[in-house]
């Protein structure tokens, strides 16, 4: 079974347990914090993946470092470690966040623009995407890319909306080459 499927199944199980315990919000925050910690601390990811470090040591490390997390999360970490899937924990945390966003109708969007969006432009993008996706909430991650010259490139899920000037110029060049 692929790592992606394994991560999804574990994340789904944790989500169901958290949902039945009515602490999905807190568990999601723990999973987001865990992802951030793993991204910032490559040694932690290496320890989780290491076959040299015992399951007991990994479990002790996780329960010590993340002692402030919800009990269900600590217990979940121990379960995953005992199944020799500790290296998948960052991916499981990411899948959990995806499930949380889907459940709460939150869409995460990457927006590239030639310069920083104004508040009005940001509101227009959010309004447009709410209509397109039916989402209750849109979370925008903005990136400035001067190569775009103008316009926007919006990515969410499997969708890409490219209204950048550079893209329009490329398309025009292709059309002129055909003629």
Image (tube, rainbow, N blue to C red):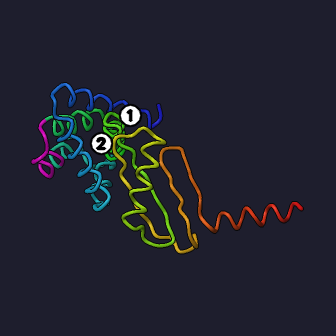
Is 111 located above or below residue 145 in the figure?
Answer: above
| Mark seen at residue 179 | none
Q: Residue at x 89, y 62 (%)?
A: 179
Is 144 situated left or right of 138 in this image? right
**In which image quadrant can residue 104 be found?**
top left
User: In front of the other: label 2 or label 1?
Assistant: 1
- Tag count in the figure? 2
User: Which percent across, then down, holds residue 6?
Assistant: 40, 33
Q: Could you tell whether 14 is left or right of 176 in the image?
A: left
Name of the residue lying farthest toward the right: 179
The residue located at (56%, 53%) in the rendering is: 161
For the residue carrying disc 2, how many other residues have a C-alpha within 10 Å: few (<14), some (14-19), or many (20+)?
Answer: many
Q: Earlier in the sequence, mark 2 or mark 1?
A: 1
Task: Give the structural element (helix, strand or loop) at label 2.
Answer: helix
Looking at the rendered structure, the secondary structure element under dot 1 is: helix
Q: In the shown orientation, is residue 61 left or right of residue 160? A: left
What percent of the width, then of the height, locates residue 30?
20, 46
Please provide percent x and percent y for residue 26. Answer: 17, 41
Disc 1 crowd rating (10 Å Cα; few below 14, some 14-19, many 20+) is many
- Residue in view at x 38 percent, y 34 percent: 8
In the depicted view, which residue is nearer to us: 53 or 135? 135
Of residue 146 and residue 39, the one placed in the foreground of this image is: 146
Does the stretch in magenta take in 70?
Answer: yes
Q: Quadrant of residue 103?
A: top left
**Disc 2 marks which residue?**
86
Q: Are marks 2 and 1 in contact (CB under 8 Å)?
A: no
- Distance Cα–Cα, label 2 vs label 1: 14 Å
Rendered view: 26 above or below 179: above
Is 96 or 121 nearer to us in this picture?
121
- Find residue 21 and report its horizontal and vertical position in percent: 15, 27
Residue identified by numbered label 1: 8
The segment highlighted magenta reads 62-71
């Amino acid at each position: 079974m692929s790592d992606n499927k394994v991560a999804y199944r574990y994340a789904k199980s944790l989500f169901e347990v958290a949902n039945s315990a009515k602490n999905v919000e807190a568990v999601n925050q723990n999973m987001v914090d865990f992802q951030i910690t793993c991204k910032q601390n490559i040694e932690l990811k290496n320890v989780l993946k290491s076959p040299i470090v015992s399951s007991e040591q990994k479990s002790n490390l996780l329960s010590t470092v993340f002692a402030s997390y919800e009990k269900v999360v600590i217990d979940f970490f121990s379960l995953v470690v005992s199944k020799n899937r500790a290296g998948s924990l960052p991916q499981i945390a990411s899948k959990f966040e995806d499930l949380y966003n889907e459940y709460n109708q939150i869409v995460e969007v990457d927006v590239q623009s030639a310069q920083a969006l104004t508040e009005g432009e940001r509101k227009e993008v959010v309004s447009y995407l709410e209509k397109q996706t039916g989402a209750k909430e849109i979370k925008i991650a903005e990136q400035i890319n001067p190569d775009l010259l103008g316009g926007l490139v919006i990515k969410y899920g499997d969708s890409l909306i490219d209204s950048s000037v550079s893209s329009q110029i490329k398309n025009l060049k292709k059309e002129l080459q055909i003629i």
